[in-house]
Image (tube, rainbow, N blue to C red):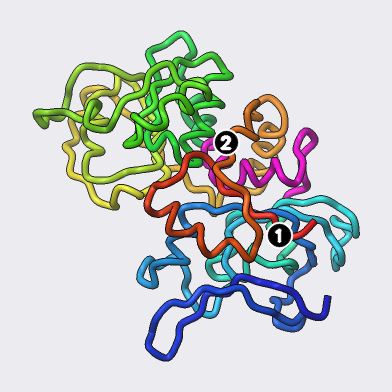
Amino acid sequence: MDQFKVLLASINDENQLQVKVTDMNRGDLPKGDVLIKVHYSSVNYKDSLAATNIKSGVVRNYPMVLGIDLSGVVVESKVAEYKKGDKVIVTSYDLGTNYFGGYSEYASVPAEWIVPLPDGLSLKEAMIIGTAGFTAGQSVVALEEHNIKPEGKPILVRGATGGVGSMAIQMLSNKGYSVIAESRKKESQADYLFNLGAKEVFSPEEIQLEKKKPLSHQRFQAIVDPVGGENLADYLAQLEYGGSIALSGNAGGIKFQATVLPFILRGINLLGIDSVQYPKERRLELWKQLGNEMKPEKLSQMIDREVTLLELPETFGRLVAGKMAGRIIVEISK
């Protein structure tokens, strides 16, 4: 493996972002504790931003091997915790943003970033879940820690056809919650969302308020929100007393205007969901759950497409444009 394939993002002489599959030498990898032969990765919204928008801020320094998650097999290890042949997962931290990532046939990473592949998951299934599914799992756990109940009012899942949304629908539905899915692709993807477990499907326009006001009809007990954006106040206004919104993304924008009234008159909880620096102990426990009681039953049905490393560059624009449902899986090596 003196030379292998990677997907490299770099800046050319005209200050333009270039993303292409190229060869890399072993000595070009970071000097991590564990060398992994990568079998699978996936395409997340953050990956697509890094590959298409030089001003996104996702990548701090170029050139960069992209890919914020990976699964594979240990081939070399400097630590006793991992040995050759171990199956492992790496997600989050600086992977693919400030440290060479998962779109590479080999990855060298710090030992503290690694999670042993949980019982109940294959390397491929772990990447169908990936960062998106892990974020969905965090959102569900956070909401349950704030007293959501299956017998309560429905839970709204925004961005429902995306990775986080698709996973959250299935996780919540499997636990017995009544789930309402919100999607801009209601007309074309309703059957997909019903199949995952949604009870109803609405467009954003059907959820957002015609007349802006800080408090409205108490429609939902909780919301899983990987979208954010300027209409977030509309969603806060429709939570029931003591309700919570688990906010994990900004696909709809980073700013919104609201008043303090939902928080002080209804005791609303705005829960920030960060997968990057999630504590290691909780990370290990959540991955175990994702391989067991929280494992979505229809993982294979959530694959929008499966691509090779060579085919990968064509997929980023598709995700940014919202022309997909579920997950894009990358087979790096057999």
Q: Which residue is depicted at the point 35% across and 49% down?
A: 251
Is residue 130 part of the magenta span, yes or no? yes
| Residue labelled with disc 1 | 332
Q: Which residue is depicted at the point 47% across and 59% down?
A: 316
| Residue labelled with disc 2 | 302
Is residue 141 part of the magenta span, yes or no? no
Magenta region's main secondary structure?
helix
- Which quarter of the picture shows residue 75? bottom right
Q: Secondary structure at mark 1?
A: loop
Q: Which residue is depicted at the point 48% across and 28% down?
A: 192
**In this rendering, is residue 202 above or below 260?**
above
Residue 328, image x, y percentages:
56, 48
- Amino acid type of the residue that numbered disc 1 sits on in the rendered structure: Ile
Tell me the CA gap for discs 1 and 2: 19 Å
**In this rendering, is residue 231 above or below 43?**
above
**In this rendering, is residue 121 above or below 144?**
below
Left or right, 293 with respect to 3, comes to left
Q: How crowded is the residue under tag 1: few (<14 C-alpha within 10 Å), some, or many (20+)?
A: many
Q: Secondary structure at mark 2?
A: helix
Q: Which residue is depicted at the point 35% across and 30% down?
A: 186
- Which quarter of the picture shows residue 272? top left
Residue 153, image x, y percentages:
37, 13
Instruction: Answer whether labels 1 and 2 touch (C-beta < 8 Å).
Output: no
Q: Is the C terminus in the top left, top right, bottom left or bottom right quadrant?
A: bottom right
Residue 239, image x, y percentages:
29, 23
The magenta segment: 115-138
Left or right, 295 with respect to 271, comes to right
